[in-house]
Amino acid sequence: MGPHPAVAAIRLAVRRVLHDVLTMAPPTSPAAPPAPSPSCSSGPSCSAAPAATAGRPPLVLVACSGGADSMALASALAFEAPRLGVRAGGITVDHGLQEGSDTRAAEVVSRMRALGLDPVESVRIEVGRAGGPEAAARDARYAALDAAAERHGAAAVLLGHTRDDQAETVLLGLARGSGIRSLSGMATASGTGGRYRRPFLGLDRQTARKACLVQSLPVWDDPHNADPAYTRSRVRHEALPVLEKALGKGVVEALARTAQLSRDDADALDSWAAAVEPSVRDDSGDLEVAKLYALPPAVRRRVLRRAAIAAGSPAGSLFARHLEEVDRLITSWRGQGAINLPGRVAVRRQGGRLVLRQG
């Protein structure tokens, strides 16, 4: 008799990603043994792993909070990795935002060790305030995961985002009036070299929770996930249920499908913009207004975004409203002055050219 359907589903999802890692990941290279990170807890909740060395199997880490999604992911990785000749470890990030978070992190480390993961590590981070509490926590968390992946020489880091998380992300993008790239949600692979992998984007949250239940895996429900002070929590517990009630079942699946369709379109438009950009620049590298005007708006704004980033504007601070203002220098020219972009980049229209300069 085979495993429970929920367990079979999570294992299959992880197996596919591991096959991809084995196929796509570059060979590991020799490195000096790593020292524990300064932010890494000492004692039993932190163990520094040996560095990746030539000829050793690739290492895949799971980012585990102790919640149902990430515990299901950790269990599937622990089961599948040795069968495919992959080393499997785990990282838990202690945000320090709740009383007893260090104890909770130590418990998660123990659970990962009980699954057979090695190395395992708890990393304490300091969460700032830039961009709001959710964005600040996310930025600090990914910075810690990046550092852990480098420290251990990991080929990939698995994240437990589910189809439900994807639907929430699309709704948040809609509420902000964001463009198609935002509506495309989370990618199955992202980060430097596709470091971050999301095996569960095709699975719902209940499948992960059921897999934990039938395997008797203890899980922790983060109270922040139910706190209405957080926007994503309100989307999860208020907005999505209302939509399901008004429109019927299937809203989550439809939103996740929208994300994939949007991603395909955004990728195609990005490729078009990258290909056409050299042809709209003159010999000095400035952008020719007449050639920009002839482009479809979606492609033109992508060219403008690429040019702004190349001039020094930070990608994470460059929003649709900035590009709309720059676009008006092309489509609604009335002699207006320079447009100031993040990163101290100024855009001016001069003699049929757009000139982007930093400082």
Image (tube, rainbow, N blue to C red):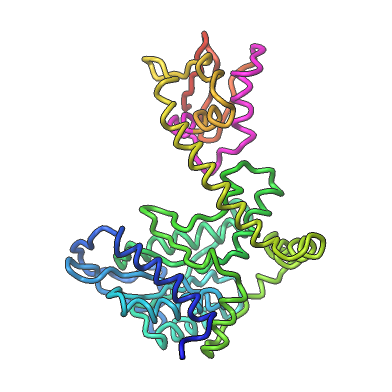
Q: Is residue 299 among what the camera can see? A: yes
Q: Quadrant of residue 62?
A: bottom left
Classified by dominant secondary structure, the portion drawn in magenta counts as helix
* Residue 329 lies in the magenta-colored region: yes
Q: Is residue 238 among what the camera can see? A: no
Residue 204 or 347: which is nearer the viewer?
Answer: 204
Above or below, 100 relative to 309: below
Above or below, 286 relative to 26: above
Most distant residue in the top direction: 351
Most distant residue in the right direction: 246
x 60%, y 72%: residue: 205
How far across and how far down the image is residue 328, in percent? 63, 22
* Residue 89 lies in the magenta-colored region: no
x 46%, y 32%: residue: 272
How far across and how far down the image is residue 55, in percent? 17, 68
How far across and how far down the image is residue 72, in percent? 51, 78
x 44%, y 29%: residue: 311
Residue 189 or 92: which is nearer the viewer?
Answer: 189
x 31%, y 79%: residue: 83
How far across and how far down the image is residue 222, in percent? 62, 75
**Magenta-highlighted residues:** 306-335
Residue 201 or 306: which is nearer the viewer?
Answer: 201
**Number of numbered discs overlaid on the protein picture:** 0
